[in-house]
Amino acid sequence: MKVIDTDNSSTPNVPNVLDQVLAQRQRVADRLAPISHVVAVMSGKGGVGKSALTANLAAALGLAGRSVGVLDADIHGASAAAMLGARGQQVVMAPAGATPAVGVAGVRVMSMDLFLDGDDTPVAWQHPGGLAADAYVWRGTMEANALREFLADTDWGSLDYLLIDMPPGADRFDTLMRLVPGLSGAVVVTIPSQVSHLVVRRAITAARQAGGRLLGLVENMAGLVTPSNSSAETAVQELSPNGGRAFAAEMGIPYWGQVPFEPRLAWSTDAGRPFILEDNQSPAGRAILALAQQLEEALANEISV
Ligand SMILES: Nc1ncnc2c1ncn2[C@@H]1O[C@H](COP(=O)(O)OP(=O)(O)OP(=O)(O)O)[C@@H](O)[C@H]1O
Ligand SMILES: [Mg+2]
């Protein structure tokens, strides 16, 4: 177990704490200054493919010659390093900050996974004591603190894109907005089920309330490619015809299309080779390329965060 000691009983006095917070905020601003676009990949719903799409988008942008970083904001369910083939690398703590790992297509990665001792090691916070009822709030604070540390201390250098792989949960975007005031926006991921739409709808509302810009909505696992259709000229059998498009229209978010259910995408991405490196001409591959293009177009007129 990786226990992170949060005991601050030795904290000298309150003004010092405030100074530290302000200094850290400044460090976050300085770190993000040379990054053109910071984009969250969010859903609210778990297991819809946020991490897999983030890894594939990052790899697609990297292959197109962009400098890309991925920050894994999922502290407890970290998977970005694995999906980008960066597991097992050491994060070097240099005077300029923590040097991110480098995954496929030159994508730089920072993730709690890179700091854990082994595959079975969970992240655990050492609770300072007090009411059990406070533990939930306190744990959220600890996660936000860990994310703030990543933002403040990772030496990304200059990047065209920093993609942030968000954990599930409708309230997560609000936390991110507080930490990254210049966030370019978010890509919203859903799957074609009513239950997913119900959860994603709440997350969209929460993101809007936090002042976030919702760049586009992607419907993942949206259809099946039948074996006879798996060549270049395929038609995907949609699970909910036009459902994603209608949902995006209802939510007032640009519809960025569908990524079909593709077992090879899961196999290769989970093994550290984003599918876009394996087959960019399949329906899923082409859909990911189209997503990358739409992201670039949506942000083309934005100067810098
Ligand atoms: N289009 C797809 N076709 C087939 N498998 C997919 C597709 N998209 C994602 N997957 C697979 O589904 C699983 C869940 O995806 P992923 O971990 O990216 O979801 P997530 O939204 O990040 O989950 P969490 O909320 O736990 O962070 C992974 O094994 C992933 O490779
Ligand atoms: Mg994930």
Image: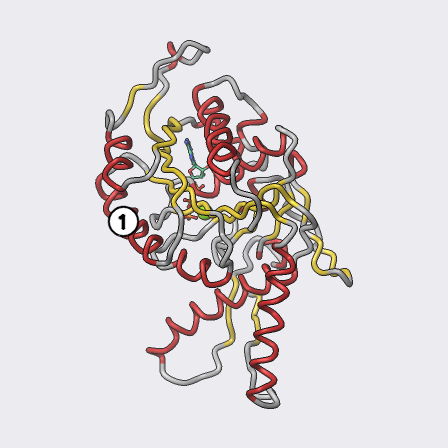
- Look at 51% across and 38% down and name the residue there: 301
> How was the colour assigned to the protein in this rendering?
secondary structure
183 relative to 242, above or below: below
Circle 1: residue type: Val
Does mark 1 have its CB less than 8 Å from ligand 1?
no
Nearer-the-camera pick, 2 or 303? 303
Residue at mark 1: 199
At x 54%, y 56%, the residue is 120
Q: Residue 129: x percent and y percent?
A: 44, 84
Q: Where residue 96 appears, x then y in whole percent? A: 75, 60
* Relative depth, front residue between 224 and 109: 109
220 displayed left or right of 65: left
Residue 92's image quarter? bottom right
Q: Residue at x 49, y 48 (%)?
A: 184
> How far across and down, in percent of the image, does residue 48 sit?
37, 41
Q: Residue furthest bottom?
A: 13
Element type where label 1 sits in the image: helix
Q: Residue at x 54, y 65 (%)?
A: 146
Q: Is residue 200 left or right of residue 89?
A: left
Quarter residue 159 falls in: top right
**Mark count:** 1
Ligand number 1: quarter of image: top left
Q: Position of residue 27 (x, y in %)?
A: 64, 65
| 199, above or below 131, in the image | above
Q: Give the quadrant of the N terminus.
A: bottom right
Crowd rating for badge 1 (residues with CA inside 10 Å; few <14, some 14–19, many 20+): some
